[in-house]
Image (cartoon, rainbow, N blue to C red):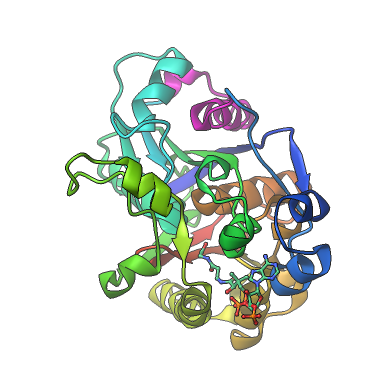
Amino acid sequence: MPRTRFLGTGLAVPDRVVTNDDLSQMMDTTDEWIRTRTGIQERRWVREGETGVDLALAATRRALEMADLSASAIDAIVYATSTPDHFAPGNGVFLQRAMGVGTIPAIDIRTQCSGFVYGLSVADAWVRTGQYRRVLVVGAEVQSTGMLMTTEGRNVSVIFADGAGAAVVGPADREDRGILAFDLHSEGAHAEKLWVDSPGSMYHPRVSSEHIEAGRQYLDMDGKEVFRHAVVRMPESVRAVLGASGHTTADLKLLVAHQANLRIAEMMQRTLCLRDDQIYNNIMFYGNTTAATIPIALDECVRSGRIEEGDLIVLTAFGSGFLWGSAAVVW
Ligand code: UT7
């Protein structure tokens, strides 16, 4: 069974840049607080009318271009997002329509910050079993329309942001290349520590004016608890996936981790005893784009030469669910 390899990557972010000073006009916060507590300097938010699927399509086009493939060469779409344009259907079908391709399968993955890693594992299984040959994996989010832009919501609204990353994967032509292993987990005991309560089908009606007045439609996070678990689970998962593929951190060229908070990345780096050149951070410029952070970072690393053919890399994520996981890849 051939392994699955990356054929192309792409990213797209809105052109609207929102600085920390911009946020301090909307809520009681400062550039200094945001930089020291999160590492974020600026982020991108969509303008009214710009959708997650628009960003996903732009990222997809760049990934196809790198792979030297046309849209019609894609056999299936895996779309990871926690912020779909609509409650139903999922964004996968809207992307299929926007791409103008035939009636290929399209599924949405609802595993939030871990969405790209989970989506990649689905694509990997499809490729290795021969069910689909070339699979598009997207991580795309529009968080800015679901955040409370006041002092009450500041622990969330200074962090989360909008963006998209895409990857085209397919069978590797060499035995020593491609995705080596996955490590995936969930722990629903912590589901309400980072969640959006409403709309939900358990409510009659799914969303009410009382919900809206209480702000239950906004992303809500117990930041300290999420932080505490993230700094343990991601290093644990990185070690597990390296172990499963017969490697150690000494063999690692680059760790491309979910961009949640620069302090989380720094603690993870220390726990894993990684050199600065073994970890990539770009949260400074994009904030936390949930399922999009990993494919955005991956694309930057590939285009800038931080990742080259034959390099061992690990992708790792942790977030809402809690859900977390990693993938080990020889590029
Ligand atoms: O995507 C994966 C999931 N997300 C994450 O992994 C995020 C994990 N959590 C975090 O990154 C951090 O917990 C935060 C950045 C959200 C918060 O940082 P913290 O160091 O845990 O701050 P805190 O919540 O303990 O708040 C410290 C103080 C509080 O004031 P008092 O009670 O000490 O007076 C907060 O009210 O900072 C205040 N605060 C702010 N001040 C200015 C909270 N948010 C802000 C803000 N600006 N934006």
Principal secondary structure, stretch drawn in magenta: helix
Residue 230 lies, in percent from the top left, at 49, 75
> Looking at the image, which residue is at 58% across and 26% down?
50
> Looking at the image, which residue is at 41% across and 37% down?
84
Evaluate whether residue 127 shows in this view: no
Task: Give 197 or 52, whichever is nearer the viewer.
Answer: 197
Evaluate whether residue 67 shows in this view: yes
Would residue 265 appear left or right of 285 to someone viewing this image? left
Would residue 310 appear left or right of 208 to someone viewing this image? right
> Looking at the image, which residue is at 17% across and 42% down?
204
Would residue 184 appear left or right of 330 to someone viewing this image? left
Quarter of the render that holds ligand 1: bottom right
Query: Per the image, is 230 magenta?
Result: no
Residue 104 vertical position relative to residue 324 in the rendered view, above or below: above
Residue 214 vertical position relative to residue 17 in the rendered view, above or below: below
Q: Quadrant of residue 156?
A: bottom right
Q: Quadrant of residue 102?
A: top left
Task: Give 56 or 192, whichever is nearer the viewer.
Answer: 192
> Looking at the image, which residue is at 59% across and 32% down?
59
Magenta stretch bounds = 50-73
Residue 37 lies, in percent from the top left, at 71, 73
Tally of numbered discs: 0
Residue 115 lies, in percent from the top left, at 42, 52
Task: Give 28 or 12, whichever is nearer the viewer.
Answer: 28
Query: Per the image, is 54 magenta?
Result: yes
